[in-house]
């Protein structure tokens, strides 16, 4: 069997798959069986006297050539020729070929070839059609857009993979889907209307919402056209991202109307396509009037450089900035700081220009006025320079040391005061490096000093210089930096005031203060020791006096009893005095335990503690809202215990007694708490004695006490970096104030 008959190349015959072999066997068997059937039909026809058996063989050859190809057609021609010669040509039943029979055999061959050629042409057309359909199908499936073919009833007959993804189902599920089922309910009445429009317009483009299988509606762009044979082709593109981008763009465009700057967009031909509210406010044209106008003609722009040069830079760099003069609707000329930004499309081609303009007309006027002022100032400076040179000689009259040095620290001017202080004449000092000449000792690194000078144009501090005779002097030095017209440092003016004697006095004062503090500490230690050592003798005096009173009671007269009672009272007072003095000394020696103190709870606790001692009295307590503070809780408790106890004691003669505790909010740096009463008060003339140790403004017989309570209050408050003071009027009560720093405002 030849390669044409099998349809396979020679080198692939041995590798032909079984289905190919079976198909070839069937084709050749069809040729043989067809000839056999034609022979049977011919013999049957001859039996009934019907001739023209030739036609049945031609039919078989044509059928085989058309459906089975060239190889089986040849077999059919050969077999038909042999059968026709053997059974229907004289002499019958022989294979003798006569010359006159040659045309019949030639007709068999030609007819077979002709029909075979037509069959081959038909198969080529069918193969090409199948290839075209396959390619068309591949193109449809490869298309990123969804493609759906609808029949006349609006049913899907063909779709691609993109359509299945858009719908959210398989391609098989799409077949038979009604077009209306892809529309949301509110748009389904438009289906028939749009199909009718396609018949008249050919192609219809519109946007709609596409209903997915899960019920989600997404925006799509549709191109609907007739596909022939009462079918319609729909190309659908998901525009969800574009819609979101458009929404974001609309939001951003609306934001552009909020700015006071002028913003408009023009295309590459110069026509305005967007005009914001700021542009309308500056130029006077509304957006409806400006859009479509050529920007250069509308605003009658005057550029600082040739327009072509501006465009060339814009196209090259994508931006341009400069000052441009525009004309408003009313003819007024305005100067704007203009910024141009170029927008390009996806292919990189220029698409549009965003122009942002900021009105700087007033600034330009101010700059012009400033320039004129500067010129006038230059003239005045020149006039004053001569005066300054004349007055420079006055620096020699001051007793302060004044000299000028350049930025290399070389002296350029040296006045008479410097000569008197340091000992060098001007001609000896000028040109020398300052710090080498004076052997300067600085209070901080010189680099830090220079950095401060360059940053603030001045520096102040104390320096140690060495004079010509080797004496060290301390000077209060002030440096002032001079800058040139361009703002660059040019010189340093240094003024030095000799404070050597003042520093010696300060050092002597510091030593005296240290000695005083040391003496105070020794005095506190002495007071603590004395008060501690006195406690035992006082207890002995009181104890033995009580024993004496007990055992000698029968033999004592009234005078003796009164004297013993006075001894006991004095011993008790002395004990209390020693205890208070000991407590006072301990306060100066104790360490403060700083924490947050809730004053309101602390004060209420103090009031509760003294309540049992005041049950027989009528006292009106007025305790307001008190702030929190930072300090030692036990010490602050002692402060308010003393103040509140004093208020209770000195209102003993009042009925009712009124004691008020509250706070003032007058300072951002401290809290102020007061204790106020309606007691006997005091004379303000003696207020400086209130907080002294053992100082009393009332007699012991009228009001008991040791005179140490308020001194203790003052010492505790001072240890908290606070203040305490009192105000009072005789018989009209007193008020004591305690001011404590707020947290973070002082180191406690």
Image (cartoon, grey):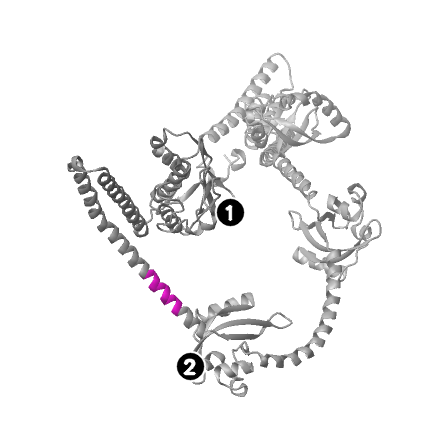
Check disc 1 and report the residue beneath it: 668
Res 158 seen here: yes
Query: In this view, which residue lies farthest toward the top?
Result: 48
Which residue is at the far right?
A: 331
Q: Which residue is mark 2?
A: 471
In magenta segment, residue 267: no
Give the left or right position of residue 533, taking residue 412 as reference: left
As helix, strand or loop, the secondary structure at mark 2 comes to: loop
Q: Position of residue 207 (x, y in %)?
A: 68, 31
Q: Is residue 510 magenta?
A: yes
Left or right, residue 134 beside residue 205: left
Q: Position of residue 667 (x, y in %)?
A: 51, 47
Q: Look at the numbered discs 1 and 2 and tell me whether their residues touch, using CB distance below 8 Å.
A: no
Viewer-side residue, 392 vs 680: 680
Magenta range is: 508-518
On the image, which quarter does residue 652 sit in? top left
Q: Is residue 276 visible?
A: no
Please give the label number shown on residue 367.
none
Please state which of residues 624 and 555 is positioned toward the viewer in this rendering. Answer: 555
Around disc 1, counting alpha carbons within 10 Å, would you say few (fewer than 14), some (14 to 19), or many (20 or more)? few
Residue 62, image quadrant: top right
- In the figure, 627 relative to 501: above or below? above
Instruction: Tell me the distance, in whole angstroms, between the alpha carbons under discs 1 and 2.
Output: 50 Å
Q: Position of residue 330 (x, y in %)?
A: 84, 49
On screen, residue 280 versus residue 653, left or right, reads: right
What predominant SS class does the magenta segment belong to? Answer: helix
| Residue drawn at (17%, 42%) of the image | 544
Give the residue at x 37% y 39%. 645
For label 2, count other residues whose C-alpha is less than 10 Å away and answer few (under 14), some (14-19) or many (20+): few
């Amino acid at each position: 069997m030849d390669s044409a008959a099998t349809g396979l190349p020679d080198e692939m015959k041995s590798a032909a798959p079984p289905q190919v072999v079976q198909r070839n066997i069937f084709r050749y068997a069809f040729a043989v069986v067809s000839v056999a059937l034609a022979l049977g039909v011919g013999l049957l026809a001859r039996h009934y006297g019907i001739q023209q058996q030739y036609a049945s063989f031609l039919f078989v050859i044509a059928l085989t050539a058309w459906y089975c190809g060239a190889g089986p057609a040849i077999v059919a021609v050969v077999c038909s020729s042999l059968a026709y010669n053997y059974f229907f040509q004289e002499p019958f039943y022989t294979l003798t070929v006569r010359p006159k029979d040659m045309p019949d055999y030639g007709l068999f061959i030609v007819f077979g070839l002709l029909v075979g050629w037509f069959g081959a042409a038909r198969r080529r057309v069918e193969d090409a059609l199948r290839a075209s359909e396959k390619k068309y199908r591949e193109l449809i499936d490869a298309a990123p857009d969804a493609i759906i073919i609808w029949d006349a009833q609006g049913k899907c007959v063909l779709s691609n993979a993109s359509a299945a993804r858009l719908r959210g189902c398989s391609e098989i599920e799409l077949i038979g889907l009604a077009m209306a089922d892809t529309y949301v309910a509110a748009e389904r009445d438009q289906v028939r209307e749009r199909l009718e429009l396609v018949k008249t317009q050919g192609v219809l483009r519109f946007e709609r919402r596409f209903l997915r299988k899960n019920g989600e509606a997404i925006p799509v762009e549709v191109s609907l056209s007739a596909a022939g044979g009462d079918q319609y082709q729909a190309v659908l593109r998901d525009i969800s991202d574009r819609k979101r981008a458009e929404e974001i763009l609309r939001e951003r465009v609306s934001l552009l109307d909020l700015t006071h700057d002028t913003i408009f967009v023009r295309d590459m031909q110069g026509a305005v396509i967007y005009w914001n509210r700021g542009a309308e406010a500056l130029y006077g044209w509304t957006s409806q009037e400006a859009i479509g106008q050529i920007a250069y003609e509308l605003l009658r722009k005057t550029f600082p450089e040739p327009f072509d040069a501006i465009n060339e830079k814009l196209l090259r760099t994508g931006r341009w900035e400069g000052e441009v003069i525009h004309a408003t609707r009313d003819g007024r000329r305005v100067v704007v700081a203009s910024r141009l930004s170029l927008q390009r499309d996806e292919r990189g081609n220029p698409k549009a220009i965003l122009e942002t303009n900021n009105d700087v007309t007033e600034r330009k006027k101010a700059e012009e006025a400033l320039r004129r002022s500067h010129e006038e100032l230059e003239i005045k400076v020149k006039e004053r320079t001569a005066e300054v040179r004349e007055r420079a000689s006055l620096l020699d009259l001051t007793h302060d040391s004044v000299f000028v040095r350049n930025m290399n620290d070389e002296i350029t001017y040296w006045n008479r005061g410097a000569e008197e202080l340091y000992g060098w004449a001007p001609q000896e000092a000028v040109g020398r490096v300052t710090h080498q000449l004076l052997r300067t000792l600085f209070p901080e690194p010189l680099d830090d000093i220079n950095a401060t000078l360059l940053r603030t144009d001045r520096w102040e501090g104390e320096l140690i210089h060495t004079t010509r005779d080797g004496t060290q002097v301390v000077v209060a030095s002030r440096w002032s930096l001079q800058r040139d017209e361009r703002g660059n440092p040019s010189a340093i003016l240094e003024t030095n005031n000799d404070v050597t004697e003042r520093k010696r006095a300060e050092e002597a004062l510091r030593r005296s203060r240290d000695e005083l503090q040391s003496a105070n500490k020794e005095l506190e230690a002495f007071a603590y020791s004395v008060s501690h050592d006195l406690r035992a003798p006082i207890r002995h005096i009181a104890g033995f006096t009580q024993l004496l009173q007990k055992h000698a009671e029968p033999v004592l007269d009234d005078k003796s009893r009164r004297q013993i009672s006075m001894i006991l009272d004095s011993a008790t007072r002395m004990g209390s005095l020693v205890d208070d003095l000991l407590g006072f000394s301990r306060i100066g020696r104790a360490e403060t335990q700083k924490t947050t103190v809730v004053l309101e709870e602390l004060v209420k606790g103090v009031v509760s503690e003294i309540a049992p001692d005041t049950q027989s009295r009528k006292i009106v307590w007025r305790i307001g809202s008190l702030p929190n503070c930072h300090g030692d809780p036990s010490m602050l408790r002692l402060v308010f215990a003393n103040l509140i106890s004093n208020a209770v004691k000195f209102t003993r003669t009042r009925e009712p007694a009124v004691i008020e505790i509250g706070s003032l909010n007058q300072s951002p740096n401290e809290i102020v708490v007061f204790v106020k009463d309606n007691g006997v008060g005091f004379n303000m003339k003696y207020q400086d004695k209130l907080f002294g140790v053992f100082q009393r403004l009332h007699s012991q017989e009228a009001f008991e006490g040791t005179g140490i309570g308020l001194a203790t209050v003052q010492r505790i408050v001072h240890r908290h970096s606070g203040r305490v003071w009192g105000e009072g009027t005789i018989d009209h009560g007193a008020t004591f104030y305690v001011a404590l720093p707020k947290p973070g405002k002082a180191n406690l």
